Amino acid sequence: MLKWARAKFQPNLPLYGDKRVTASKEHVAISLKAAEEGMILIKNENNVLPLKAGSKIALFGKGSFDYVKGGGGSGDVYCEYVRNIYDGFKALGDSIDIYEPVADFYRKNVKEQYDNKAAAGMTVEPELPDELIPGAKAFADTAIIVISRFSGEGWDRSSVEFEGEYNPWESETSMPKTSAVVFPDGDFYMTKQEKAMIKKVCDNFEKVAVVLNIGGVIDTSWIKDDAKISAAVIMWQAGMEGGLAIAKILSGLVNPSGKLADTFAAKLEDYPSTANFHESPWYVDYTEDIYVGYRYFETIPGADKKVVYPFGYGLSYTSFELSDEKACEKDGEIFVSVKVTNTGKYAGKEVVQVYTSAPAGKLGKPSRELQAFKKTALLQPGESTVVTVSFKASEMASYDDLGKVEKSAYVLEAGEYGIYVGTSVRDTVKCAYVYKVDKDTVTLKLSAKCVPSSLKERMLADGSFEALPQSTPHDKDECIFEKQTPGSEEAIVPAVAPHDRYLMMHPFKGQPLMDVVEGKISLDAFVDQLSIEELIHLLGGQPNTGVANTFGYGNLPEYGVPNIMTEDGPAGVRLSWETGIYTTAWPCATLLAATWNPELVEEVGHAGGEELKENNLQVWLTPACNIHRNPLCGRNFEYYSEDPVVTGKIGAGMVRGIQSNRVAAAVKHFAVNNKETNRKHCDSRLSERALREVYLRGFRIIVEDSDPWVIMSSYNVINGHRVSECKELLEGILRDEWHFNGMVTSDWWTRGEHYKEILAGNDVKMASGYPERVMKAYEMGAITREDLAHCAKRVLGLIIKVD
């Protein structure tokens, strides 16, 4: 097929020959495989799991039918079917027998709640009838309790709601208000009804296993502390085949190999970021600084006692032994190797994790930081393998934002750097080799960027706080002419020009873009022939074509520039149900991170990219790579981890897979988008050190390891500057420091001013540009032709890259 044929003509043709790959058996099988590999066994007393063939079980909890395949908003997917845990066991045949009367009760109740417009995962746990217990107790040898949770885009996991801006969808059901009814104490905790059901089951069954169908962290202390609960598996929100995957794991057909990519603490208040999460709808102070997740729990005195299950933790049906740990340095690279042996009775996989410790020095450091990891292949009982990983010694450096050692520089402070190898942050062995630094060493000298003006203090390694410099805050709404009414930008779509605009006109108005592709003219020469109006046109979103519903880029047919289409992610190619096209629903990002397997995630990305391309779409708006700062964030299911290395390596795998199809991945939401409430105005106020070491590091790894073609700037404000208008972030850090050479798109319907976004290096405003306002800024001298051309070249560069 000729270049851009799918963008221009929207052919109804399979990607390969005469067989469609979209939602194919092969792709569904990959979704199932990923789901199996990311589920985590967190408890298994007396080897209650796996269930033996011929076992009789009773399924309790509305979650046995109220299965949540993924979160809401852009992370939702229209797929042909979804299997819950009941369906999963039934698909395995007669090896496990289910007590049907209890299943019938929950099936009927969930259907009634769905019929009354309840969303999956937002249903109320019904009272378990006493009369069902005797029969279930006589029939089943194991009770399985299923708990489900749901969250989505635009709201956080609480009842707090912001209503201070125009809302074009004010008649829609408010999810925070629904959450307040269903989860009076917040969905982090079990409800009163869930607690009653759990107690009733535990009081009547000797063997009880729990399955958690969740997208993010919840309280699991009740699982760990209750001796009556023998086993538990976190199945996550596992996509369309999640029910089959968990059934295979519980039945022993698959040995769980997932590991936690987040720290599970007992209370919301145990996370230091909870205290001020909802302090204001207009800002969030990141006073915990770099001490996020395990960096907090493993460092701050006393915090370790708050942990239920630590970062990196996960059990297996077999056992592993790590031995012969070795480390060395060569040419600035640290190499670590370890022998892994399966010492148990089942075939299984283990994850080798490498952490480092650093001297406290003047800057203060977390007690442990993950630097590298690798998952083994499937090891048979008695089989061994040697795992080798490496990382740059400079990755152990800390950023000095106040000049305690060297201002605006990454510094390796003098002292010894320990290297630890293990299977979780708490289950490690220290290598004999120690990396020694004789004197304070600057590894990278930079300049200050995105410095806070209003953050008053930040946490230190001993749990105390240090005061930070204050300055006059930037006016984020500064504009050379009258601003639009906040919220009036919402849901504005690109104007549809007369029909002949969409015809690929011959003769062209000038030299066509294909001449650039074929090397006949330079991109500079192509752009030189465009008028100011045409340049501005390229810098706004374009109308949908074909099955697209999130608009496009380009669309200058008189110059042979196609209109390439975007589509939502990250849990699948999110086509509207009206198209009648099913796509594959992949497991949520939290599960994919829990695989600790970038190669498997790359396979998911490749398959998803195939579906995107087959449906004549060119840019997939995924992966989402924000840090799990706090469990309350409603969009954590879309994001990978509390750790930037896991985030970066898993995200890079996804990008490589997608772009292997010559379609683009749009890595989002750049950056520090850790709260959904009032997300288009809320100011994330954090130190430059925390910004660089925690919240940007994952994005940097993705840029360096996978060369994404698109980065999506986030809605929020960072230290007083709207991200889409922040030149220090988009040009200074992303392009000048990291050498990103792709295109930056805004998120959809930001509150940034279009001309200011262009000046900041945000190349395209989505879903629609504001050409009249940009032209007004041009006529007032606030923006130049060179500014417009600079961004237009990057838009055209993206179009040239895709098929």
Image (cartoon, helix red, strand yellow):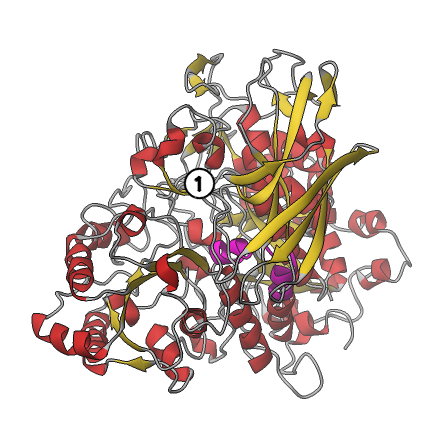
Left or right of residue 573: residue 227:
left
Above or below, comparing residue 62 to residue 19 in the picture? above
The quadrant of the image that shows the C terminus is bottom right
Query: Which residue is located at x 60 percent, y 74 percent?
Result: 615
Q: For the point 35% across and 54% down, which residue is it?
A: 151
702 lies above or below 505? above
Q: Nearer the viewer, residue 745 or 684?
A: 684
* Viewer-nearest residue: 335 or 714: 335
Asked whether residue 618 is in view, the answer is no
Q: Main secondary structure of the magenta part?
A: helix
Question: Position of 567 compared to 514: left or right?
Answer: left
Q: Amino acid at mark 1?
A: Asn
Count the marks: how many?
1
Where 470 falls versus 136 (above or below)? Answer: above
Q: Which residues are magenta?
A: 589-605
Picture coordinates of residue 672, whole percent (x, y): 50, 37
Examine the image and state in which quarter residue 701 appears: top right
Q: Is residue 123 visible?
A: yes
Extreme residue toward the left, this view: 131
- The local crowd at label 1, few if under 14, some if 14 to 19, many if 20 or more residues have their Cα within 10 Å, is many
Locate the N terminus by quadrant: bottom right
Q: Nearer the viewer, residue 749 or 98?
A: 98
Q: SS at mark 1?
A: loop
Residue with the mark numbered 1 = 674
User: Does residue 732 show up magenta in the picture?
Assistant: no
Q: Position of residue 436 (x, y in %)?
A: 73, 22
Residue 194: percent from left, percent from top? 19, 57
Q: Against 679, is 250 above or below? A: below
Of residues 376 and 687, the one nearer the viewer is: 376
